[in-house]
Image: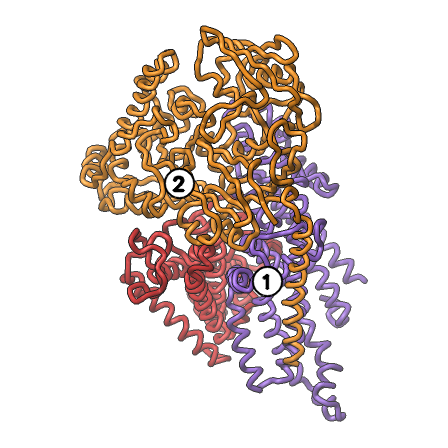
Amino acid sequence: MRYVLKKTGVLLVTLLLISLLAFLAFQIIPGDPTAKLLGNDYTPERAAALRHEMGLDRNVFVRYWDWLTGFVTGDMGASYSYGMRVAEVMEGKGVVTAALSLMAWLLVIAISVPLGIALARWQGRRIDRVFVAMNQVFMAIPPFFLGIVFTYVFGLVLKLFVPGGFVRPQESFWGFLGYLAFPALAIAIPKAAMVTKLLRSSILDQMDEDYVRTAYSRGNSRWGVLRGHVLRNAILPVVTFLAMTLADIVAGSIIVEQVFALPGLGRLLLASIGNRDYPVVQCIVVIIAALVVFMNYLADVVTQTIDPRIRLG
Amino acid sequence: MTKRILTLALTLVMTAALFIGGGQSAWAAENGSTGDAELIVGIAADLDSSLDPHVSSSSAGTREVLFNIYEGLLKPDTEGNLVPAVAEDYTVSEAADQYTFTLREGVRFHDGSEVTAGDVVYSLTRAAGLDTGEPLMATLANVAGVEAADDKTVVVTLSTPDVEFPAYMTAAIIPEGSDPADGIVGTGPFRYVSRSPQENIVMERFEDYWGEKARCAKVTFRVIEDGQTMVMSLRSGAIDLAAHLEASQVAELADLTVLEGSMNLVQAVYLNNAQPPFDEPLVRQALCYGVDKQMVIDLAGDGHGFAVGSSMYPAFGKYFDAELTDFYQPDAQKALELLAQAGYDAAHPLAFTITVPSNYTPHVDAAQVVVNLLDQLGGAVKAEIQQVEWATWYSDVYQGRQFEATVCGMDASTLTASAMLSRFVSDSPKNFIGFVNADYDAAYAAALATEDDAEQVARFRDCQSILAQQAANVYIQDLADFVVMQPNVTGYRFYPLYVMDLGCVEKTA
Amino acid sequence: MKLRHNKNFTAGAAITAVMLLIILVGLVWTPYDPNAMNGAAKRLAPCLTHPLGTDNFGRDILSRVVEGAGATFLIAAATVAIGLAAGLVIGGLTGYYGGWLDEIVMRLNDALAAFPSILLALVLIALMGGGKYNIILALGLLFIPSFARVVRGEVARQKSQDYVALAKLMGAGDMRVLFRHILPNIVPVLLPSVAIGFNNAVLAEASMSYLGVGVQPPDASLGRMLNEAQGYLLTAPWYALSAGAAIILLVLGFGLLSEGMGGDYGAA
């Protein structure tokens, strides 16, 4: 319990630090937003009036506090490019990125856990060697290239999905998931290859431990030992790695959304960066970073429940 | 174990196929009959943040979408004539300084209310800025007063006579007292439903439209900024129609319905005449000699496109001066001489950046060819491309005038020669290239002042000649406009203006 | 240097050597000028004169892939160089001196690690603007923390070694001890990190240029070419495939090299 409390404390501090860094980066560096907002109508007097109206003439930490309290209560400020609140601009887009990332992450687990265990069991056989070599190649494929290949093979040639198409979950939930399936697979495969490799070698490392030999000597079968003793220990580094992978998966989905023309946060982020719509960029960055930190926190807590030995961290 | 993995993989693929298959069949059922069809149109740029039809700085991409939602007293037809819309008829006073419009019976706004003279007076007063003193639409600066003679008659009085005035009466009519920022209400064949930034704009058929009703029940404009994704989405059937494609993109889509028209704009390397290095006419002329426009058309457009030599395109008929097209014959030697006179050679090359909006493939491609052609001048010119997002281009280059060179297209909002030429008057707010020339200003003013048609044409042609002589920009072409539609979509019509009329587009199941 | 997985190292070295050779040759000679446009040879299928066909402007795709691989490689090299140089200084100093500065820098390192790398790169691009040189700078900055971490750990380990004490006894100053004595000894540990760095830098450059914020046209880069090729998937799939294959080979080569040298590929 103390461990969880301590980790929760660290989580909150990190979240604050991230939000502060993002806020400072986008408030201080880009210069005067009024120039963009006023465009042709720019005069120093109008700019000053607008700065006052927007509260930009106040102390930066006061502004940070306002922004943070607003953010927590769901009011994320006004977009520079659209006459809308940031929350309105982002409406419906977070769901796409979240669902895509989650689906990819579940696919990583669904592919790598059975495959890793199987390869460890078949260690040294030809099929193991073939898969290990293939793994190496799959790890080197950038997700967006895999996305392009999928578009060609499954979309244009086999016509299993409509590249560039999309439906909102409100319209058709299953259709929505269907449009995410191939993008998710494109993100998942390179990561699944890494996790498979890690799990396989983690299991093989454990197999050399003394307790495994003892278990054998008690007459347990190889599969029995694996299931009963080894997996529990071998899975620990994998859980940590899976949590770390989530950051990469979210990053991957930013790019893969472009390949499949999915209207998620990634596309909005890129467009907003191009439009220099900093309030939107800032919110998306904080949301994604917070998500990653939170997942790492969850992984820490889960690992700790599986293996009480690392309680002291 | 292998089997299990195989099964897993198969299940995944099959479930995916099922999801999508399911989605498609539901789709077909919804769209069984013709009149209920939903049309999905790809557009290359998100609309402006403001959808106010009276804001004259709106981009062409926004105006062509709003064409379906808003109407003026008059509207252009496919031949370029003005036909009555909200007005049924109009008369003009002897002196051409007073226009009297009779409103059509039974024209309704999208909110259900009937259009009255009060709405028209409000709309024109607002657009001409009569209450604020600052006209929202520069074309209406000449309006001195708008009055309702009775419930169905509106009289517009001008400060100075203008025979071209009816062309400006395409200004949108909106309900009295309304502000487009609070809700988009017009009288057009489609009703605005919603927009999602960077994603889509949705409109529905307006059932109480006074004229011929739209053929499709719903139109969704999908924002697809990437030219490659646009081609892929047409290929896959994710969108039904996309306009403004270029020849190389169409080559990939040969089995769909492809229509070729003209984009009705002037594509050029627009040069910032107000800042070095292009404040020097010799340098601008050198570029004109160095860029072979036919090469640009051949390489970037597969030979489709109509070469032009000044700020006017062929659809303008008598105003268009075809002889200016070859004002600068491609001549590398001449270009190098002019550059040398201006102090540039291989040792001190002319270095500049061409800023291009990344979402408009025809402009990006043309810029690539231009850089390639300039590279062949023996190292005397070093041009670089910088792609920027559309909104950034619009705020920095067009409004902010912070650029050296850019490749883009300038179109006309009305079919009057002044719509193309007014922007180069020295103090025009739209003069983003900072072109300052007293002769030009004089010729333009003379053209506006005269009531004699032949004289006006001659003066407008003078304007074009001055632009060419001064090498204000490196003029290239009026782009070919390719419209690609799925085979079940018909009825697209070209206009001599940059508009996309979707009312007559039909989609069968 | 002990090579843990020799097979990996050999395969990685072979792939990397071939790619480097192609890139080197490409610097001085390509079958065609990669930027030369030819209206008479547009969108050709692979044939004898153009083994990978031509693109939309009649440019030779093989020449562009070679040129693009070179551009991607050079950007990756510059990125790694920036990250490594700054990482050496920061990691060396914090590892050698320790103390509160070390604590602050490492906490900052951890906070930065929470951001997905592409996201951080995009934030930097948002603040600095796109283009080839800004990409190098942004990715270089991004790579500093991971190098700093490796260097710091190794320096902290080495500083208690006998040879360091000996050098100090002989009157060498801190800087001399750090950069002349300790640094050469951490090179073997650093090499796998450099290989992983290359691996990640190639992927990052390709991603950024694919998204349009990296290398600008008409210059070739593998990521840019993938973006261009996407519109011609059905008529010219080899365009996308050849650019993609070049990325995969570069990444695979460096990945295997790193593993062969004992690095933990994929965990970076």
Q: Position of residue A73 (x, y in %)?
A: 75, 41
Query: How far is mark 1 from mark 2, CA to CA?
Result: 34 Å
Query: Which image quadrant for residue B282?
Result: top left
Do marks 1 and 2 share a chain?
no
Where C4 sits versus B19, above or below?
below
Chain of the residue on which disc 1 is drawn: A
Tint applied to chain A in the drawing = purple
The colour style of the image is by chain
The chain whose colour is orange is: B
Label 2 crowding class (10 Å Cα cut-off): few <14, some 14-19, many 20+? many
The chain whose colour is red is: C
x 77%, y 71%: residue: A308
- Residue type, label 1: Leu
Instruction: Please name whichever residue, A196 or B226, is drawn nearer the observer in this view of the structure.
Output: B226
On the rendered image, what quadrant is the N terminus of chain C found in?
A: bottom left
Q: Is residue B279 left or right of residue A161?
A: left
Chain of the residue on which disc 2 is drawn: B
Q: Position of residue A173 (x, y in %)?
A: 71, 54
Q: Is residue A11 visible?
A: yes
- Residue type, label 2: Ala
x 54%, y 82%: residue: A129
Query: Which image quadrant for residue A187?
Result: bottom right
Query: Which image quadrant for residue B341?
Result: top left
Q: Which residue in the structure is indicated by mark 1?
A: A160
x 34%, y 24%: residue: B318
On the rendered image, what quadrant is the C terminus of chain C found in?
A: bottom right
Which residue is farthest right? A1
Q: Is residue B395 visible?
A: no
Q: Secondary structure at mark 1?
A: loop
Q: Which residue in the structure is indicated by mark 2?
A: B480
Task: Count all numbered tags in the image, as a single digit.
Answer: 2
